[in-house]
Image (cartoon, rainbow, N blue to C red):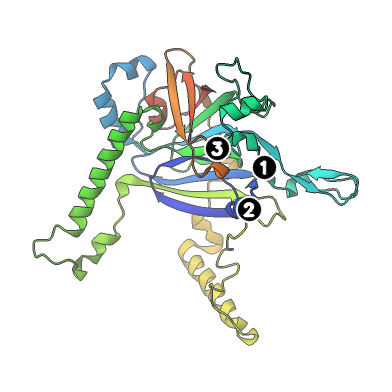
């Protein structure tokens, strides 16, 4: 089953994993798809590849020159982390099996009811100690009283606690398809080097961005010599997109067959085309059939038989992107990654992850094509 949606403009998205929101709300369970995908369709300034240069080149440019170049030339990359499901320890959800003498972890089953692994969804429950403060963790023996950083901020001593983080930086390139584990944390930082900014630098950027948005609103709605609030002759102006911020993507998650996908997500209108609130009598179902046939005819005329105009390049011609490891030389850089959602969704009481690594610079977040991988440690 495929769950899909789209986005057309460049906006900031904090780090998160894609989950079944309704299952989390109703059961407190983090339920994830098998794979997540981003298909980059039309990216503003994509053809203008920024030459990040070497670390030495990047260091010689002034901060103002770097900022001007970056703002002018690049939409944000997708950043994918090896952290999965929650930014804290989790336990695979246990479900009753058909056998009275045993139980099964999601993805497994008792000998009496074999379950195909491919038909099961990744489901996890966040360990409650992720929400405890350090004093409470010490009371329960989860932190050593003499420890100065806990190699384990989340209070989990199992191997599931990731001490070393991997961060892949994937530039947005027209025609590129990104695929990753459906439980992996991912994000879109705006500006691209957002995670390297200090708190003061981020505040200054947000204030500047807000001022520019307000100025655009003033120009669009209030700059009228005649004093008219609304002019029907200019309706088209309100429908124009800001192509300078275009980052048109299709996002889709694949769920195991038989999983029914995420709860509460409505099927495509052509699959079940009755709009919400509309009831059809049994003898009028032909109306629905006609609507579906009309939609297919429209698509056939616009995109050709079998949507041939939308077909991608044959798989045999696809090229895998090499991943370059960022050098571990140079000064240590702090990487501040904001986490999306409430504590239950994040799987931790922390609102941001503090990471540190070497070889990380702004140019990695602004590169035009090259995929980079950074190795970090949590602070």
Q: Mark 3 or mark 2: name the one nearer the start of the chain.
A: 2
Secondary structure of the residue carrying tag 3 is strand
Q: Position of residue 239 (x, y in %)?
A: 30, 61
Q: Which mark is residue 23?
A: 2
Q: Is residue 368 left or right of residue 119?
A: left
Residue at image point 54% right, 72% down? 276
**Location of residue 367 by image quarter:** top left
Secondary structure, mark 2, is helix
Q: Nearer the viewer, residue 299 or 277?
A: 277
**Residue displayed at 61% across by 30% down:** 136
In the drawing, does residue 136 fall left or right of residue 174? right
Furthest residue toward bottom: 283
Residue that label 1 marks: 125
- Given this view, does label 3 or label 2 mark the residue nearer the observer? 2
Say which mark, if any, is on residue 185: 3
The mark lying in front, picked from 1 and 3, is 1
Callout 3 crowding tier (Cα within 10 Å): few <14, some 14–19, many ≥20: many
- The Cα–Cα distance between marks 2 and 1, rounded to whole angstroms, is 11 Å
Tally of marks: 3
Q: Is residue 154 visible?
A: no
Task: From the top left corner, tell me how far across and down residue 190 is, in percent.
Answer: 38, 38
Q: Is residue 109 above or below residue 4?
A: above
Quarter assignment of residue 68: top left
Q: State the image coordinates of residue 318 (x, y, percent, origin top left).
A: 55, 39
Gap in Å between the C-alphas at discs 3 and 2? 18 Å
């Amino acid at each position: 089953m495929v769950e899909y949606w789209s986005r057309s403009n460049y906006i900031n998205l904090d780090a998160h994993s894609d989950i079944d929101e309704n299952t989390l709300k109703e059961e407190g369970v983090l339920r994830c798809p098998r794979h997540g995908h981003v298909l980059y369709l039309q990216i503003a300034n994509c053809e203008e590849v920024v030459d990040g240069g070497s670390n030495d080149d990047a260091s010689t440019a002034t901060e103002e020159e770097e900022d001007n170049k970056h703002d002018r030339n690049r939409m944000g990359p997708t950043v994918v982390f090896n952290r999965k499901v929650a930014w804290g320890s989790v336990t695979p959800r246990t479900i009753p099996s058909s056998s009275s003498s045993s139980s099964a972890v999601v993805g497994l089953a008792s000998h009496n009811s074999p379950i195909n692994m491919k038909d099961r969804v990744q489901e996890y429950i966040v360990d409650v100690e992720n929400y405890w403060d350090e004093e409470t963790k010490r009371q329960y023996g989860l932190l050593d009283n003499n420890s100065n950083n806990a190699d384990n901020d989340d209070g989990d001593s199992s191997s599931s606690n990731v001490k070393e983080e991997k961060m892949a930086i994937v530039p947005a390139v027209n025609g590129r398809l990104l695929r990753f584990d459906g439980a992996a944390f991912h994000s879109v930082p705006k500006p691209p080097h957002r995670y390297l900014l200090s708190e003061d630098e981020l505040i200054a950027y947000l204030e500047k961005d807000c001022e520019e948005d307000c100025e655009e609103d003033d120009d669009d709605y209030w700059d009228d010599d005649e004093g008219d609030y609304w002019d029907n002759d200019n309706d088209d102006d309100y429908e124009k997109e800001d192509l300078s911020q275009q980052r048109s993507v299709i996002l889709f998650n694949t769920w195991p067959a038989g999983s029914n996908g995420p709860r509460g997500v409505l099927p495509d209108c052509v699959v079940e085309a009755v709009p919400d609130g509309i009831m059809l009598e049994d003898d009028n179902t032909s109306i629905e059939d006609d609507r579906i046939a009309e939609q297919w005819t429209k698509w056939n005329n616009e995109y050709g038989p079998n949507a041939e105009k939308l077909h991608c390049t044959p798989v045999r011609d696809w090229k895998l992107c090499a991943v370059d490891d960022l050098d571990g030389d140079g000064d240590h850089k702090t990487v501040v990654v904001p986490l999306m959602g409430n504590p239950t969704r994040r799987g931790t009481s922390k609102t941001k992850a503090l990471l540190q690594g070497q070889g990380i610079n702004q140019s990695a977040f602004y590169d035009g094509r090259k995929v980079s991988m950074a190795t970090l440690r949590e602070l």
